[in-house]
Image (cartoon, rainbow, N blue to C red):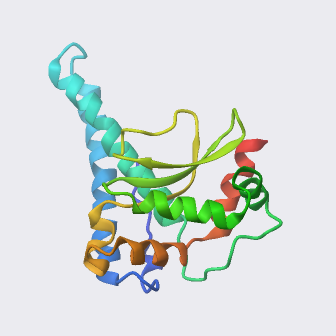
Amino acid sequence: MYEAKDFSHLLGLSGFSDNALNTHFKLYQGYVANTNKLMGKLSGLPKDTPEYGELKRRFGWEFNGMRLHEYYFGAMTKSFSPLDTSSPLYQKIVEDFGLYENWETDFKVTAAMRGIGWATSYYDPIAKRLFNVFVNEHDLGHLAGCVVLLNLDIFEHAFMLDYNTNRADYITAFMAAVDWPIVASRLPLLTT
């Protein structure tokens, strides 16, 4: 069984009201609870039933909702510092995008696209390449075999309480809260 992680240390984060964060934490906790419920239900159902098939399909939505929120909250901090220019991640960004600023612009443009979902910066361990991708739903559009380095929740629940429809200001607030040491630490684990 999965347990919801405690992200309350983010309360007081600049650019994010405690009300919006607490609302978002509850949504995340629901994904964890539903992942566990589905695992329990699936283990007790005959595998040749339509109900089993539908719950199997739903499992990807709930599980990815849980895990993507863990990546998202886990990459945020109240003590921002820029990405270390000597880190392997910074070097990889420059290799793949020419400049860090090009990567950041691409990530922000991806996050600002119309629609709901996730802006996700992936590392492909096979091609050893970075991609910024718009993922439409928790369970649709992910790059198979790639690893999430940084993701930004662009469902309305993530920004409407604080920013109404002004997604650009939300994206700016998020980028100012990225915990770059955590994000950078996700890359070396993939390349060894």
Residue 22: tell me if it is visible.
Answer: yes
Q: Position of residue 89 (x, y in %)?
A: 73, 57
Q: Residue at x 57, y 71 (%)?
A: 178
Residue 152: tell me if it is visible.
Answer: no
**Would residue 150 appear left or right of 85 to someone viewing this image?**
left
Q: Residue at x 27, y 73 (%)?
A: 165
**Would residue 144 appear left or right of 117 to someone viewing this image?**
right
Query: Eyeballing the image, is 161 above or below 36?
Result: below
Q: Position of residue 114 (x, y in %)?
A: 33, 57
- In which quadrant will I find the N terminus? top left
Q: Position of residue 141 (x, y in %)?
A: 41, 39
In the foreground, 42 or 117: 117
Numbered disc total = 0
**Would residue 96 appear left or right of 106 to someone viewing this image?**
right
Question: Going by the picture, which residue comes out furthest to the right?
Answer: 86
Question: Going by the picture, which residue comes out furthest to the left?
Answer: 50
- In which quadrant will I find the C terminus? top right
Q: Residue at x 50, y 64 (%)?
A: 108
* Corner quadrant of residue 161: bottom left
**Would residue 6 appear left or right of 161 to someone viewing this image?**
right
Q: Residue at x 27, y 38 (%)?
A: 38
* Corner quadrant of residue 54: top left
Query: Eyeballing the image, is 107 above or below 137?
Result: below
Q: Position of residue 8 (x, y in %)?
A: 42, 76
In the foreground, 171 or 182: 171
